[in-house]
Amino acid sequence: MDRLPLFPEQASTFAPDVDHLLFFLLAVTAFFTVLIFGAIFYFAIRYRRRSDKELPHVQHGGMALEILWTVIPFGLTMVMFTWGADIFFRESRPPDNALQIYVVAKQWMWKLQHMEGKREINELHIPLGRAVRLTMTSEDVIHSFFVPAFRTKQDVVPGKYSTTWFQPTKVGKYHLFCAEYCGTRHSGMIGWVYVMEPRDYANWMRGGESTGSLAEDGAKLFQDLACVNCHKADNSGRCPSLVGVYGSTVKLTNGATVKADEAYIRESILQPNAKIVSGYAPVMPTFQGLVTEEGVLQLVEYIKSLGGKPAAASEGAH
Amino acid sequence: MITAAVQERANYLTASHGIKSWLLTKDHKRIGLLYLFTITLFFFLGGAFATLIRIELITPQGGIVSSETYNKLFTMHGVAMIFFFLIPSIPATLGNFFLPMMIGARDLAFPRINLLSWYLLVIGGLFSLFAMLAGGVDTGWTFYTPYSTTYSNSWVIATALGIFVAGFSSILTGLNFIVTVHRMRAPGMTWFRMPLFVWANYATSLIQVLGTPVLAVTIVLVFCERVFHIGIFDPALGGDPVLFQHLFWFYSHPAVYIMVLPAMGVLSELISTFSRKPIFGYKLVAFSSVAIAVLGFLVWGHHLFVSTQSVYAGMVFSFLSYFVAIPSAIKVFNWTATLYKGSISYATPMLYAFGFIGLFTIGGLTGLFVASLGIDVHVTDTYFVVAHFHYIMVGGTIMAYLGGLHYWWPKMTGRMYPELWARLSALIIFLGFNLTFFPQFILGYLGMPRRYHVYPPEFQVLHVMSTAGASVLAVGYLMPMVYFVWSLRYGQLAPANPWGATGLEWKTPSPPPLHNFDKTPIVEHEAYDYRPIIGGVPESA
């Protein structure tokens, strides 16, 4: 590896976007730095004190100058704001056809699950050119999923799902860092992202031991945890049928409605009394502590596999 | 002749003797010196932690201390430097000493409360010091939950209590300054005749009084969750971990301006005195201090761009962050314009002022990078941010603090420091600082996360450069420590006004008498009117 790298690799569609904004900022700030430093050096030498009795002319402020050096920098900063906000907005909107991968962070490792059931620890294999959407949560403290070569970073927060996405543009092996301080072995919470040719990726997917897909594991859990006893598919149970619920709009007892996205399903498993579906009694016990974050993800995937239209990317989940 | 007379006069240092006369003093000048002594101890303590951090980072595999110790080192470096050095630095030492003198007052409005403030800082400091000696704390100075409330096995509560108590010191100092500026100005000292140092400290005091209580509340909430397991921040207890970040930064972002506004005030004094000109755009510079104090409360969310805060909140906070950049830019342009056709001296305080403008400009301009959403997603929590805020707080605040200390040293002690050594120290600090922190911008953009004990080997060369710079910087900081102490005994006796400055503090002997002025001064001139000081008619330029 390079002994003295000065610029990070560009390996996602966002990387050149972020770097172009960086170059713009570098140009603007270099201009002002040279302007200010140049003026100070010039004035300091040109107007150095020549006698102790020297008393310079007094000029009071010049309004025209003040307005000039307020308005021009302000205009430039608004360009920076708009440009940066545009990139940020696109980073928060994963495309619908993105490859879905689940991430569970814990002190001090990354656990990654592919939809087809493949699991990885501290390594993520993804195909070149395909948008990848990560849905992430943490089992303990706050972590942050950071891949410098992709220029993306997203905190991974316990108790909720956060999402990020990227589209790799270059085959290679890239650093994965935890960027939010998370305790003693924070600096050991690192890994690699492998971007592979789609053919190699398909081979990799087939290789190794393969457990069931996420949804299959979720179906098993749905039986084991006895969810099936109440959530009957034909809606004859004490609790609502979950067929087609994902992506639908659910009416609650308090009259409000809620979009049934991943976060809603997760909450309904862990804190079932937070939102009660209209027409049903709050009879479901909490599964907090009875099912791991990975188990919750499997259940979510199972419920999604029961049909329904995909929920729009949840607000604020960037 | 004059110096002999100075020597014989009774002054605040000779007015009474003995340890009790210091520990029970109500004289704002002596209290300023008590603060100076206290925060210098914390500066060297924080500096010692920084030294160990930089030595550890010479090698990527982290061989010298354990990860646990490393995490404690950067935490205690931050706690000591921010809460017990930078926040009290300029207001509590130079402000305490000179704010009353600059407006022609005999003391602050509440001298007993002023002494209480110092005791609170000391008590808070002892709590935190105890935590450090007992085993340290490893949460980072930011105390993010739920790590700090549930997972950390270190001295979180003792440290947090120390910060809680020290916070009241800050609140009371702010309160004292506000009342003093409103009520104690000498006849003729109108608001727009006040030196800009007073304006800056006034604006700072507003932040201290309005912001610090939020920090106190946040610490109480952390206490409740950690000790009584009341679910506030930890989702396992039903809390929201990101709520903590909102509360913490609601104080801690304005706290950045607590640290840098007084530095800007010092700069205005230095630039004016050593170019013998009134500050260009005096009123705009004064108002920009107040604007920064107000706008500083509206930008905390820019620390949370990737925290799961809503995308639209991120945009609002980014937009507002650019707003707060403008008053800072105005100040830099106005200081530069002041130099135009001035009579510029290269005395040590001015060299520090030049250093401040250089480093603060870089620190401020890199603030534009981190305020930009698209770039911040990549650089937040990396060394880019570490470099950015060190340019502001160390490059800005400490340069101004040292510049101010050199400027007012003759007044405080009655002695001159050795000019040649002092100029050399300014130069060494400037060079050492840039060598330490400039490579960290590159490290950050490359993706090196902050708070990493062990790091990938490709970052080593830049880390070694940074450590080399830190050793130069350490020499630069030790030098003033040595020659200031030396000057107390061997320095030349200082005249009343060695710089030809205009402030009221220079119209009384060095060191000042117990009550500052023999008779209450009457102010008849604008701030920074050099004609009565230098005399004669202005030369045509």
Image (cartoon, coloured by chain):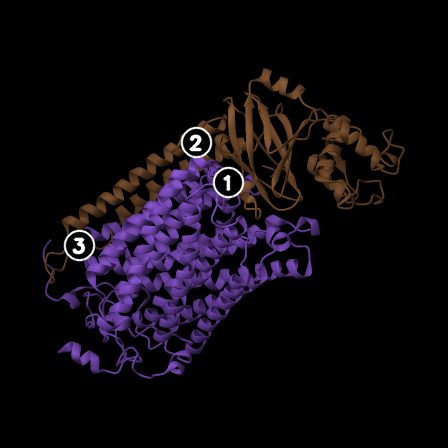
Residue B101 in picture, x, y percent from top left: 31, 72
Disc 2 and disc 1 on one polypeptide chain: no
Q: Which mark is residue B498?
A: none
Counting every numbered tag in the picture gives: 3
The purple one among the chains is B
Name the chain letter of the residue that bears numbered label 1: B
Residue type at the position of mark 1: Met
A224 vs A45: above or below: above
Q: Which residue is mark 2?
A: A8
Question: Does residue B242 appear left or right of residue A223 in this picture?
Answer: left
Q: Colour of chain A?
A: brown
Residue B376 in picture, x, y percent from top left: 47, 39
Query: Tags 1 and 3 in contact by the CB under 8 Å rule?
Result: no
> Quick one: label 1, few (<14), some, or many (20+) residues within 10 Å?
many
Secondary element type, mark 2: loop
Q: Which residue is mark 1?
A: B315
Name the chain letter of the residue that bears numbered label 3: B
Of residues A140 and B137, the one nearer the viewer is: B137
Q: Give the CA distance from mark 2 to mark 1.
A: 26 Å
Query: Tags 2 and 3 in contact by the CB under 8 Å rule?
Result: no
Of residues B37 and B98, the one nearer the viewer is: B37
